[in-house]
Image (cartoon, rainbow, N blue to C red):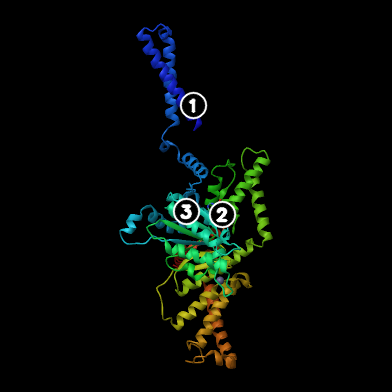
Amino acid sequence: MKKKKIVLTALYISIFTTIVLTLGSYSGSPILGGFGSISRLMLIFASTSLFLYYMRMNQSPELEPAHIKNEKREKDDKKNNRPDRPSTRFVDVAGLDEVKEELVEIIDFINNPEKYHSMGAKIPKGILFYGPPGTGKTLLAQALAGETDSAFFPASGSEFVEKYVGVGAKRVRTLFEKAKKEAPSVIFIDEIDAIGAKRTTESNNEKDQTLNQLLIEMDGFSSSQTVIVIGATNRLDLLDEALLRPGRFDRHMFIGNPDVRAREEIFKVHIKNKPIDAKVDIKNLAKRTHGMSGAHLSNIANEAAILAVRNNKKNIGIDEFNQAIEKVIAGLQKKNAVILEKEKKTVSYHEAGHALVGKILNTDLVAKISIIPRGEALGYVMYAPEEDRYLITKEELYNKIKVLLGGRAAEEIIFGEVSTGAKDDLKKANNLAYQMVCEYGMSNLGNRVFEPAIIKSCYGMIDTEIKSIIDSCYDESLKQLRDQSELLHEVAQALLEKETLTGEELDTIIQAHRQKNYSIAT
Ligand SMILES: Nc1ncnc2c1ncn2[C@@H]1O[C@H](COP(=O)(O)OP(=O)(O)OP(=O)(O)O)[C@@H](O)[C@H]1O
Ligand SMILES: [Zn+2]
């Protein structure tokens, strides 16, 4: 700013002197006229140069490259205590395509509120990002603000937890006041469980007041004020129901660990501005970092860069990446969070087993199979939502149990032994069998219902029936998978390689397999 003033003053002086000298020479003044025409030309040259320089300094910010403009604005905002308007964009968030797709609608809401208001539609207020740490929840919230040119108000739930009653609530109020004033804005509350955890009977006055204030604020602002509140948590199950009600945090998005394709993309984002040796194979790095989060991968890229500096290298080579990966893996091993290659294989066959039994019996539609850990599960099969059902037949219940046992059956067929991975499946399968015997009258005990009061007295009988259902279902799953063992290998191998398969990819594998066998048979 100072520089600009000096240039402007110099420009004025040189223009002024040029004019005075020029006029002086024509007026015949003995003093002014004494200056030669060369000096006048020099002065004109100086004024023109100064003028051009000044114009350049004042160049319209529109013409500046976006990143320079954004950096300048961020600095300026900080200096003037204005809220941050992040320059992060969706391209900076790798993977997470499904979540980004869902957010596109919210972005349109924020960017074109009139369109929605004219239809009487309300802009959603609260979004909840849940999932393991370091997966890009904060980054995504920043990108949402960046894409909509909104003010970004980051906060952490723990900031609102105070000893003194009313302090947390006041902080919540102030935060919302500021955000409303700067609308459109995005409030991001990380670790929202610190204030939004389920209320218990032993009341904690301060915490309850803070949560109440948050609920009041969320109910309070009209949807014409574009303030989006994003909460983030590692544990959705801890949150108070009141927080999840319509009009509050009613959109829940799971932000999971990246699969191999997403890991490759994340690596690409984090090496974009780093000199990388041509021999470094990003695909291979992605393969070797199963189970790691985006934060781990960004850490690896950074660690490798530091090592390259330490080793006096011109660019970051494979050795540096190897060392960086080993370091992160060692850290994870300490926490017992790293999945061994053998476990990955077991999980692949287990999940492929579930999905294939489902396919063979033609039960629910598979939306996705994955060996990326989620919650306590090391892998999962996600089924496409089906229409609401109020009646389920006996055969369908049998099939559900067979699908649940398909994971363990696959393990037994392939490895000759079973693992603890089926714990949850067994619990669900046994619960269903129990309901079939005791509630639905679907066992050899006939159309009987067993109330809890009499179950104890005839538990042996009931248990025999549960066992018979479970055993026959397990035998059937084993048989189906043995008959299709080649296909089981193909699905599990694909899963091992890609880590997630969509329903369509699964269908393609099955179709290709059937075509191959058909042509062999004919
Ligand atoms: N999908 C991704 N694409 C690019 N970078 C990512 C991605 N996920 C994570 N990262 C990197 O990891 C860092 C940490 O991610 P972020 O803080 O967004 O995680 P988080 O889910 O909010 O974690 P926490 O639950 O611990 O708060 C980011 O700054 C970024 O460098
Ligand atoms: Zn399972």
Q: Residues within 10 Å of mark 1 (few under 14, many from 20)?
A: few
For residue 239, above or below residue 224: below
Quadrant holding the C terminus: bottom left
* Visible residue check, residue 191: no
**Residue 497 percent location from the top left of the image:** 55, 59
* Visible residue check, residue 148: yes
Find out if the beta carbon at label 2 lies less than 8 Å from the nearest ligand 1 atom. yes
Give the spatial CA distance, label 2 vs label 3: 31 Å
**Residue 232 percent location from the top left of the image:** 52, 60
* In this view, the mark in front (2 or 3): 3
Q: Disc 1 marks which amino acid?
A: Ile
Q: Earlier in the sequence, mark 2 or mark 3?
A: 3
* In this view, the mark in front (1 or 2): 1
**For mark 3, what is the residue?**
178
Q: Is residue 262 left or right of residue 344?
A: left
Q: Which mark is residue 6?
A: 1
Q: Residues within 10 Å of mark 2 (few under 14, many from 20)?
A: many
**Residue 437 percent location from the top left of the image:** 52, 87
